[in-house]
Amino acid sequence: MKTIIKLIQYTPNLTLRGVVRHIFNLKEVKDADMVVFDFASIKSMTRSFAHEYLIHKEKFAKSKKISEINVAKEIRPTFDVAKRPFVDTSNPKYVTEETFDPADAY
């Protein structure tokens, strides 16, 4: 059975990890073999939401096919950001306990 979930019905701005958990726990999502998440009319998404979504998508991918439609070009890059580590330690300006100077904080 294929199910289409229109995300705009749950929230206009995809911001909270809890919303992802709620959506993936919906009966129609759990019962479906294929789930299509419709991002129509969604204009913003946080890295937190995208990261949680990708975690759940990977977890559920073992038992069902999950895909997305109508993902706006403005929010598509957020998925790419969410795939990367939160802190880029290769950045020369990356601060560790060893390199932190409290004087720089003021």
Image (tube, helix red, strand yellow):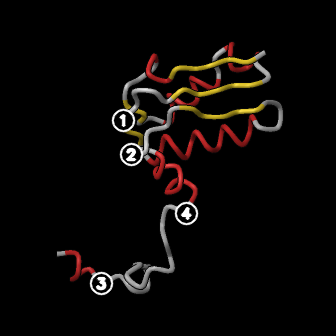
Name the residue type under label 3: Asp
Q: In this view, does 79 lie above or below 45?
A: below
Q: How crowded is mark 4: few (under 14 residues within 10 Å), some or many (20 or more)?
A: few
Q: Is mark 1 on a helix, strand or loop?
A: loop
Check the image and name the residue furthest to the right: 63
Which residue is pictured at 40% across the width and 78% down the height?
Answer: 95
Tell me whether circle 3 and circle 1 mark residues in contact (CB < 8 Å).
no
Which numbered disc flags the more N-terminal residue, 4 or 3?
4
Q: In this view, does 70 lie above or below 105?
A: above
Give the number of the mark in front: 3 or 1: 1
What numbered label is drawn on residue 101?
A: 3
Name the residue type under label 4: Pro
Separation of marks 4 and 3 at Cα, in angstroms: 24 Å
Name the residue type under label 2: Glu
Q: What element carries label 3?
A: loop
Image quadrant in which the N terminus is located: top right
Which numbered disc flags the more N-terminal residue, 2 or 4?
2
Which numbered disc flags the more N-terminal residue, 3 or 1?
1
Q: How crowded is mark 1: few (under 14 residues within 10 Å), some or many (20 or more)?
A: some
Disc 1 designates what residue? 43
Tell me whether circle 1 and circle 2 mark residues in contact (CB < 8 Å).
yes
Separation of marks 1 and 2 at Cα, in angstroms: 7 Å
Disc 2 designates what residue? 74
Name the residue type under label 1: Lys
Which numbered disc flags the more N-terminal residue, 1 or 2?
1
Which residue is pictured at 30% across the width and 84% down the height?
Answer: 101
Query: Which residue is at the front of the view, 20 or 71?
Result: 71
Which residue is pictured at 63% across the width and 17% down the height?
Answer: 26
**Numbered marks: total:** 4
Separation of marks 1 and 4 at Cα, in angstroms: 24 Å
Q: Quadrant of residue 20?
A: top right
